[in-house]
Amino acid sequence: MTDTTQQQIFDLIAKQAKIDVATIKPESTLKDLGIASLEAIELIFDIEEHFNITFPDQQGANFDTDTTQSLVDAVQKALDDKAAAGEGSN
Amino acid sequence: MSTVPLMRRVVITGMGAISPLGVGAEALWQGLREGRSAIGPLNHPDAARLRVKIAAQVPASFDPAANIDERILPMLDRTSEFALHAAREAITQSGLEFRQNGLGVRTACVVGTGVGGETTQDEQSKRLYGENSQRAHPLTIVRLMTNASASQISIAYGLRGPTYAVASACASANHAIIQAAMMIRYGMVDAAITGGTEACITYGALRAWEAMRVLADDTCRPFSINRRGLVLGEGAGIFVLESLEHAQARGATILAELAGSGMTADATDIVMPSADGAASAMRQALADAALAPEDVDYINAHGTGTLANDVTESKAIRLAFGAHADRLAVSSTKSMHGHALGASGALELVAVVGALRDSVVPPTANLDKVDPACDLDYVPNVAREMPVRAALSNSFAFGGLNAVLALKRAP
């Protein structure tokens, strides 16, 4: 089993914020972790690339105040949707 | 310090536009005063695979070949097509003949553009990387260079004074217009052709804007609580500027006076705007035009419809105008012509000239419910008949760059 989705996302966040991954809590917002504005958009891009998913459009400024848990949930939902779509088309 | 330089007054004696509201400055102004939004479904060969679904595009009825020498046409990116057509309209209206009496040598040409020939860049990249072609088109460079629009106008009309492009993202047109006006003010030239142009509805550019997550998916709703971002536009606005005495000596019809300007940089963040930077540019423009806050009736806002801009700009207007902010009419015409990036200030100057001339303030369209964090009078949805003695036109760019024009009625 590879790392959990949460672990993979936390690793990406740690890399973007240049912080120790152990300091990231599910309730931390990106802003708490020092990720604001463009860095947040860049992180979203990294996550999309990593999981090969596309988040729905959302105004960039909102990501700053999202918790890392809500990001994990959004990724999990996108992965589930992708899996469902894949099954449907097979 | 040397002696105070000659300071001449600068007036506008011609304007032209190609915009999502149609061909011609009058089509743009009529659309704006009717509150008509040109935002619609994206018309692009790759639309089906793009997330962005809407844009404000120059209508298909625009014929780039009309009245342009067929030997020149192959050299033009869409950016230059827009600019040349708008320039012809402006110059025709002004009645100036640059090849007579040496006027061409005393005329500048400064055109703003955010990026330049994006269509050309996109086509050639597709050819090289997508189709593995070994050859780029031989006219690639002359089409895509940022100064192509300014140079093509210069060649078409024999303008032999200072000619160049100005690039400052979404403030490019205003920065260009200010450069041109400065040269007239200080006596370097007697006339100038200036404005902005952009043709940014390309696959590559649309993908880049998508990735930034600032594009609205419904429409452009500046200052509205339900705004969801900006909507890309395209087009060009070109103006003829002259010194007041030059215009008066030849009995020209003066459309408005370009009375002053302000330029500042936030020096804070590459994308997040600062109210202080914007306010100081507005204050500078007022002082430069010898206007008190109470003299101004209208501000054509930058008003992109993003979360960040609209609140910050509203705060900045309050900082610059104090109590008079409550008496200002403030509108964002981007709700109708979209955000034409490096051309936006030029399209918006058409709106400001119209407002001064016709005593009508164009509305902010799609304004459902004002965001409580935006506390000014945004002229919602319907144009307002009111005397406009003086007006500001705001442009604020990514990179933290602010350029504000101050306009007065024709003297």
Image: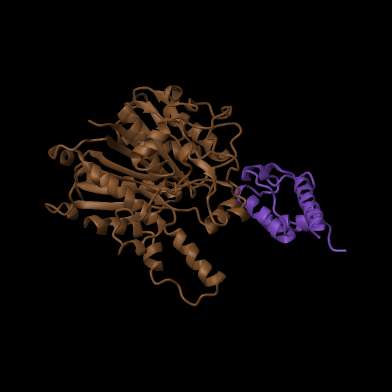
Chain colours: A purple, B brown
Q: Is residue A19 visible?
A: no
Look at 32% across and 53% down and name the residue there: B66
Residue A4 drawn at (x, y percent) = 84, 57
**If the image is split into quadrants, where does the C terminus of chain B sit?**
top left
Picture coordinates of residue B369, whole percent (x, y): 58, 27
Which quadrant of the figure has residue B360?
top left
Position of residue B294 in the picture relative to residue B108 (left or right): right
**Closer to the camera, B337 or A10?**
B337
> Farthest residue toward the bottom?
B134
| Left or right: residue B241 compared with residue B102 | right
Q: Whole-percent x and y of residue B202?
A: 51, 56
Location of residue B268 in the rendering, given as x and y in whole percent from the top left corner? 51, 47
What residue is at 38 percent from the left and 63 percent from the top?
Answer: B143
Number of marks in picture: 0
Outermost residue toward the right? A1
Quarter residue B155 falls in: bottom left
The answer to whether residue B259 is above or below residue B84 is: above
Viewer-nearest residue: B188 or B173: B173
| B213 and A84: which is toward the camera | A84
Residue B90 appears in the rendering: yes
Q: Is residue B105 above or below residue B244?
A: below
Dividing the picture into quadrants, the one containing residue B405 is: top left
